Structure formats: structure tokens, C-alpha cells
Image (spheres, rainbow, N blue to C red):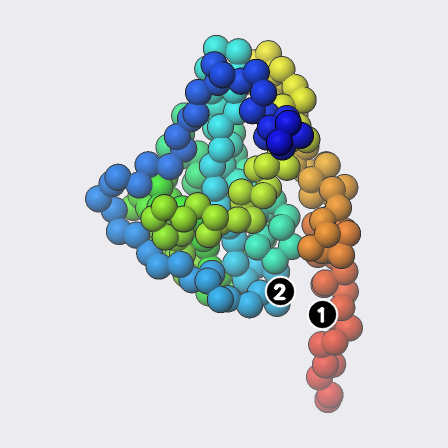
Amino acid sequence: MLRVMREEALLCQLRRRFVVTTDSGHGHRTYPNLLAGLTLDGLDRAWAADITYVRLPTSFAYLACVLDAYSRRCVGWAFSRSIDTRLTLAALRMALEMRRPPRGLVHHSDRGVQYASAEYVECLEREGAAISMSAKGYPYDNAKAESFFKSLKTEEVRLKSYRTFEEAEADIGRFIEVVYNHKRLHSSLGYMPPAEFEAKHLTETERLTPVPVG
């Protein structure tokens, strides 16, 4: 029990307060979970999006991320002092610019107002994405994003005492791009980091693609 409490940072944390990042009490439309039972067999078939908070000396900052659900690579992220649609849109736009996914991509998130807002939904619809959301009260429907944030908090955030917003943004960005995407091994990916797994997948896909005759 002591080991578990230490791993979850529950020791000597009585003054820490929980920060809510999901506000589902809004009037926007919500969508069914399309990831349930979906078999992923390639990149950019489905993305998982979520938000977490980062403690600064006198305030909080917020990190929005978009992960490829197949490779677990973080393909888009944004860091802000405000938890609003501008934050999630910045992460989404980075992912869209980096990946240029095909139409039909499943975009999965929670039911928070940042993802259900008209501006966010319109962006997804313009890209031809299918919108998917976790059922109310079931955060583990977005387990891959939750797992990513757990790694981020354990291996980066809890080991640092960020002095400024800019320092936190730089260090977290370095962790995402350099450590998590290119170095961190995942047992679910055959003990490869996401970038290596994607490269291997693309190589195998090209090898198996028939060459047109004539």
C-alpha cells in the first residue's frame, strides 16, 4: 500500500487540491463513443484528445494533447494559462498540420465544453472527421490519453519545480517531442517508442503495397 501511495503521489499531499479539467455541464451537442469495439490497423485512423493541468508556483497552467491512438504518438499539443477552446484548438491544429489525416478520422475526447464547442466541432467537420466522445462518468473510455498524462506527470512534471510558465512549456515540450515520442519504450508497441513504431509500420505498409503493372 505504501508503494502504491508513493507512486500515485498521495503521501504528504494533503494540501494539494484537485483541478477539474472537464466541464460537461453545457448545452452543446455531445456524440457517441465510436472507439468502443473499433479495431485500429493503421496511423491516423483515430486520435485521442484530452487536457491536464500543471502546477506552477502561484497558479496552474493547462496542457492539451492529441495522440494517434494506434501508435500512441503525441501529434499535437498546446500549453496555456487558460483552459478554453483556444487551447484545444491549438493542439488540434498542430496535429492537423503535422499529419494531414484522411477524411473519416475518428476524433475521440471527453464531453468537456472545450471539445463540444461550436468552433472545435466545426474544425473537425471541415476536416471530415467523425466525432467521438466518452460516455458521461467514464473517463477511462479515453484510456490512452490518460496513460500518456500519467507518464508525463510521473517522468517529467513531478520531477520538476517549474519557476515560470515559459520554463514549464519548454520542458514539457522537450519531454513530449524528444523523450516520449522518440525514446520512451511502450510494451504495447513491441517495446519501441512511438516514432520508431510508426516508421516500422510505414516501411511494412510500403513493402506490402502492390506495385501497379503497366
Using the numbered discs, state the Cα–Cα distance from disc 2 to disc 1 in whole angstroms.
9 Å
Q: Quadrant of the C terminus?
A: bottom right
In the displayed orientation, state which residue is furthest to the left: 27
Instruction: Name the amino acid type tagged 2.
Output: Gly
Horizontally, is 139 left or right of 169 in the view? Answer: left
Circle 1 residue: 205
186 lies left or right of 76: right
- As drawn, which residue projects farthest toward the bottom? 214
State the residue at coordinates (40%, 52%): 134
Residue 157 visible to the viewer: no
Residue 98: % across, % down: 59, 48
Query: Mark 1: which amino acid?
Result: Thr
Q: Nearer the viewer, mark 2 or mark 1?
A: 2
SS state under label 2: loop
Could you tell me which residue is drawn at 73 percent across and 52 percent down? 187
Residue displayed at 43% across by 40% down = 89
211 and 178: which is toward the camera = 178
Query: Are the two marked residues, 2 and 1, in contact with CB atoms closer than 8 angstroms?
Result: yes
Q: Dot 1, how many residues are within 10 Å of its Cα: few (below 14), some (14-19), or many (20+)?
A: few
The numbered dot on residue 42 is 2
Towards the viewer: 65 or 160: 160
> SS at mark 1?
helix
> From what the image shows, is residue 146 above or below residue 55?
below
Residue 165 location in percent, x, y? 54, 18
Q: Position of residue 138 (x, y in %)?
A: 41, 48
Q: Which of the marked residues, 2 or 1, is nearer the chain's N terminus?
A: 2
Asked whether residue 72 is in view, the answer is yes
> Badge 2: few (under 14), some or many (20 or more) residues near its Cα, within 10 Å?
some
The residue lying toward the viewer, choosing from 15 and 98, is: 15
